[in-house]
Amino acid sequence: MSIAAMVRSGDKKEEHIVNELNEVLQDNAFLIGATCKPTLADYDLFYALSEKNCLSAEVVTKDMTHLRRWIVAVQASISELVAVNGPSSLKGVPEVDVPTLEFGISECVPVFFYEEDDAGAGADTPASASAGSSGPAAPAEGKAAAASADADAGANSAKKMPTEAEKKAAIEKRAKKAAEKAKKKPKEKHGGGGATPAAELNVTALDIRVGKIIEVWEHDSSDKLWCEKIDLGESEPRQVLSGLRAFYKKEEMEGKHVLVLYNLKKRNLAGVPSHGMVLCATNADHTAVEFVIPPEGAKIGERVNFEGLTGDPEPENKLAKKKMLEKLAPDLKTNGDGVVVWKGIKSVTSAGPCVASKGMKDAQVS
């Protein structure tokens, strides 16, 4: 909802927010948790974007499939509220001409796989899927069949359907494979202490490295973003984008040693690829921001550790899928001495601890 407020105040560019929103919705039906219905946050941001005309087909491009799905779902929910409870159910909501966007999405044609080809998308679909669920996305040949059905409604009926015997054989094969997989999984031990508990998630899941900013330039379409080339000890500098235009000048950044969150998935920010995140300390209202930096003598590319904690960093895809950064970031801060800590545990490098560049105390690091 704070982002909705930023949209209304004009503090957040439309192309930036729609890209971020599309990425968030890749793994979430709606904005808050594992909900099956829109939340107040969804309605607030939807109306904010509507007020600023940020939901037009020109802004929400064809490749933003997750955002388009969210728009359709929230629109339908608003329509349902009005239909069931009358216009008074939206009392207090600003009068907004909510757009009903047409994205040209064709009718979904379910495609079921009963073939023996294990490479097909439906090869491992549970038997219950054949009873009516659309199941996972079809592979290329299934999609082609669906597209053909859109073009010619009669084509699908002409397609040879599997016999009941073929369906039964395919279901039995999948059930057999599932049973074999279950046998291979390690069973939990009962008694004598039980199963070994999974390691507790901690900051070692993050791969924070020492880097040096070697080049900085302005983003073409965002007045908040700097584009940077950062030396992280790799064969080539890594491109990272940072929303620091309001806090740092170009000459204050080039040549600066910084900390970079290394194991973030590459993503586009306002249309430009960014692979990693420069870490900064910030106060509660985000009016003051400063780099967190390694000590003099720390090696370019070395990993930042935390006293007494050991462990390998998680791969990029797992860090994103399990939302580990969101779970760990609230405890990444500076302490009363301006030293970077996680749950009070000090950061360490080969040359000593990392600190806020201007000594900001008790600040959030992100």
Image: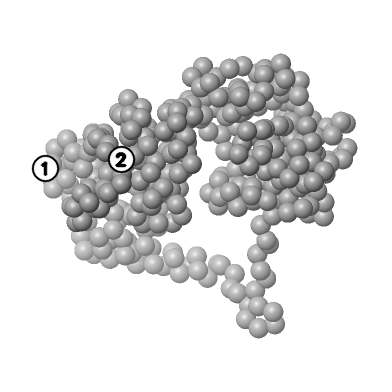
* Tally of marks: 2
The residue indicated by pointer 1 is 154
Q: Is residue 357 visible?
A: yes
Q: Quadrant of the N terminus?
A: top left
What's the residue at 79%, 41% (across, down)? 338
- Measure how far apart labels 2 and 1 are at the Cα level: 46 Å
The crowd level at tag 2 (other Cα within 10 Å; few <14, some 14-19, many 20+) is few
In this rendering, is residue 360 above or below 172? above
Question: Residue at the left extreme?
Answer: 154
Image location (x, y in percent) of residue 308? 82, 55
Query: How did the renderer colour the structure?
Result: one colour
What's the residue at 14%, 37% (across, down)? 152
Q: Nearer the viewer, residue 358 or 195?
A: 358
Q: Is residue 143 visible?
A: no
State left or right for residue 62 relative to residue 303: left
In this rendering, is residue 149 above or below 183? above
Q: Nearer the viewer, mark 2 or mark 1?
A: 2
Q: Quadrant of residue 96?
A: top left
Q: Quadrant of the C terminus?
A: top right
What's the residue at 72%, 32% (across, down)? 291
Dot 1: what SS? helix
Residue 2: numbered disc: none
Tell me which amino acid carries mark 1. Answer: Gly
In this rendering, is residue 176 above or below 104? below
Dot 2: what SS? loop
Q: Nearer the viewer, residue 339 or 165?
A: 339
Tell me which amino acid carries mark 2. Answer: Pro
The residue indicated by pointer 2 is 94
